């Protein structure tokens, strides 16, 4: 009897081990069917900050910058010539992880300190009570938006979710400041701050002239005191994290969110000298080196995927969070660094919102293909979920984004059937074309901007005038009224916030307000 029990125990042990092994193998095979997904997000990178031309012709800027790995990615996938984000960083990042338009989520400006607006209102306007504490996975934080985050949905469906680099989702001291609370298994370098104290490991990635540590990049202590650039350190850590997921046969979502090319504009010593030798302005040489360092990171990750044999099962999306910086901190003439586009970061002119976007979906996207179809940042939320094969999921928020997987499959869209919206009832700080408290609609070839201060308009035919040089608001009054009506209806539908005019102490009227339109047209005609 005793011997029989031993035999039974041994049999059960091996049978259980066999079943467990078989189950693990089946789970591994199931995970292999799920694609790996990498979102390569760049900070403040303009439409022209690359050797990849996103216009009808190659420009002077395309010839200045060297991004061979972006060229490589473009040759393997699809280039989007009309991809849009918001004018500044946090609204874009909240739209990305929530699928909501900024007018709906109300995180309409950049965030940092809890309960504090980092920018004062402009003269003549009082800002609305916007969600200055950012995105949160809970409804317990005042002045914030409660969301079901994208990484949490991916994590719930078997993905190893990896955050590397800039987060900037929630204010200091709130749950949303920590990417792991938003659904990431791993967080390397992400916190509430929107820029690094320094890009240099020798500076411990902190501003040595500052007494505060709130800008210090976290989780990189192993590189402190070493001669390494932040972009490279983040890339090394990203590869280590991905390698762990690959070794464990888990599909991964890597949010490779570089701090580059945000200020402080510091030269990447691996590339800076060659741009100096070309005679570039010293600041512009540093800027160009930041771009090329970012591009090398892309190449290093692509090389890793090929070496590991997982490239064919990995989707790569490349995007920027807003247009290239031009109003401040750059060398040369302001508002010219994104030409032929007008203006830059902080502006709703094309230079502030149109982004360099590339997607490689192995076996699906046609190599070296181009689309002129519209996409906007909130579209990434439903697209990535669809790419991951996730069908049954719930969110606490209403999702505005539209999946662009059909575009990736080569299906032509009708841009005239979709309107894009931007809402910025805030103050960025600098001045320039398209910069200010605004509400904007792009529909077909037409774009209407409503300026909250003074209730005036700009109307452009972007297809014919990509540089937004000719305001057609008075020449095309019917188009002005049509788009104003569409814009006003949308803003009301999402309970968008409007600022208060300090001269009247009343909320700024909607763009389709009859009195506003009539007064604008009459005044402009009188001025004319």
Image (cartoon, rainbow, N blue to C red):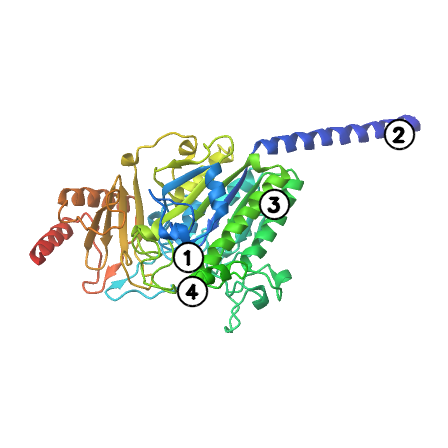
Q: In this orientation, which residue lies closer to the viewer: 498 or 26?
A: 26
- Sequence-first tag of 3 and 1: 1
User: Residue placed at 55% from the left, 59% from the top?
Assistant: 270
Between label 4 and label 3, give the one nearer the viewer: 4
Pointer 4: what residue?
A: 283
- Sequence-first tag of 2 and 4: 2
For the C terminus, give its image quadrant: bottom left
Pointer 1: what residue?
A: 142
Between label 3 and label 2, give the one nearer the viewer: 3
Residue 269 falls in image quadrant: bottom right
> Vertical placement of 501 versus 136: above or below?
below
Q: Are marks 2 and 4 in contact (CB under 8 Å)?
A: no
Between label 2 and label 4, give the one nearer the viewer: 4
Q: CA distance from mark 4 to mark 1?
A: 40 Å
Residue 57 falls in image quadrant: top left
x, y percentage for residue 310?
60, 37
Pointer 2: what residue?
A: 6
Q: Is residue 390 left or right of residue 220?
A: left
Q: Classify 10 Å Cα crowding around label 2: few (below 14), some (14-19), many (20 and above).
A: few
Pointer 3: what residue?
A: 242
Q: Is residue 468 left or right of residue 313?
A: left
Between label 3 and label 1, give the one nearer the viewer: 3
Q: Secondary structure at mark 1?
A: loop
Q: CA distance from mark 2 to mark 4?
A: 77 Å
- Sequence-first tag of 3 and 2: 2
Q: CA distance from mark 4 to mark 3?
A: 34 Å
Q: Secondary structure at mark 4?
A: helix
């Amino acid at each position: 009897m005793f011997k029989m029990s031993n035999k039974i125990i041994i049999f059960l042990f091996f049978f259980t081990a066999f079943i467990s092994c078989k189950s693990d193998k089946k789970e591994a095979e199931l995970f292999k069917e799920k694609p790996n997904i990498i979102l390569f997000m760049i900070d403040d990178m303009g439409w022209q900050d690359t050797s990849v031309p996103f216009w009808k012709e190659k420009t002077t800027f395309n010839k200045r910058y060297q991004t061979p790995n972006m060229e490589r990615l473009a040759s393997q996938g699809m280039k989007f010539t009309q991809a849009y984000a918001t004018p500044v960083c946090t609204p874009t990042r909240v739209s990305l992880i929530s699928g909501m338009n900024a007018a709906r989520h109300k995180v309409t400006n950049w965030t940092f300190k809890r309960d504090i607006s980092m920018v004062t209102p402009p003269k003549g306007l009082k800002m609305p009570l916007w969600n200055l504490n950012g995105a949160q996975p809970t409804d317990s934080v005042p002045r914030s938006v409660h969301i079901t985050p994208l990484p949490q949905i991916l994590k719930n469906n078997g993905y190893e979710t990896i955050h590397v680099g800039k987060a900037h989702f929630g204010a200091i001291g709130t749950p949303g400041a920590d990417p792991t609370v938003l659904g990431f298994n791993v967080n390397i370098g992400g916190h509430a701050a929107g820029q690094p104290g320094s890009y240099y490991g020798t500076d411990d990635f902190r501003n040595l002239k500052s007494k505060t540590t709130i800008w210090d990049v976290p989780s990189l202590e192993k590189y402190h005191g070493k001669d390494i650039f932040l972009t490279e350190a983040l890339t090394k850590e990203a590869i280590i994290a991905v390698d762990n997921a690959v070794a464990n046969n888990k599909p991964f979502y890597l949010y490779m969110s570089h701090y580059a090319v945000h200020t402080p504009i510091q030269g990447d010593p691996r590339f800076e000298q060659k741009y100096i030798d070309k005679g570039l302005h010293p600041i512009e040489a540093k800027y160009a080196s930041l771009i090329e360092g970012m591009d090398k990171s892309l190449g290093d990750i692509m090389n890793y995927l090929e070496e590991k044999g997982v490239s064919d099962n990995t989707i790569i999306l490349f995007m920027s969070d807003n247009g290239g910086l031009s109003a401040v901190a750059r060398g040369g003439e302001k508002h010219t660094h994104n030409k032929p586009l007008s203006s830059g970061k902080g502006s709703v002119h094309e230079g502030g919102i149109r982004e360099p976007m590339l997607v490689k979906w192995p076996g699906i996207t046609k190599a070296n293909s181009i689309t002129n179809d519209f996409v906007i940042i909130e579209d990434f939320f439903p697209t990535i979920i669809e790419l991951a094969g996730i069908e049954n999921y719930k969110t606490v928020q209403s999702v505005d984004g539209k999946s662009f997987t059909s575009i990736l499959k080569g299906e032509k869209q009708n841009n005239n059937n979709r309107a894009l919206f931007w809402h910025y009832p805030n103050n960025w700080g600098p001045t320039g074309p398209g910069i200010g408290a605004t509400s904007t609609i792009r529909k077909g070839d037409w774009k209407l901007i409503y300026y909250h201060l003074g209730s005036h308009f700009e109307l452009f035919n972007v297809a014919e005038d990509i540089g937004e040089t000719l305001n057609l608001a008075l020449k095309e009054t019917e188009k002005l009224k049509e788009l104003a009506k569409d814009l006003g209806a949308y803003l009301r539908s999402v309970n968008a916030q409007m600022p208060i005019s300090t001269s009247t102490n009343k909320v700024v009227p909607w763009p389709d307000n009859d009195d506003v339109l009539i007064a604008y047209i009459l005044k402009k005609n009188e001025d004319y």
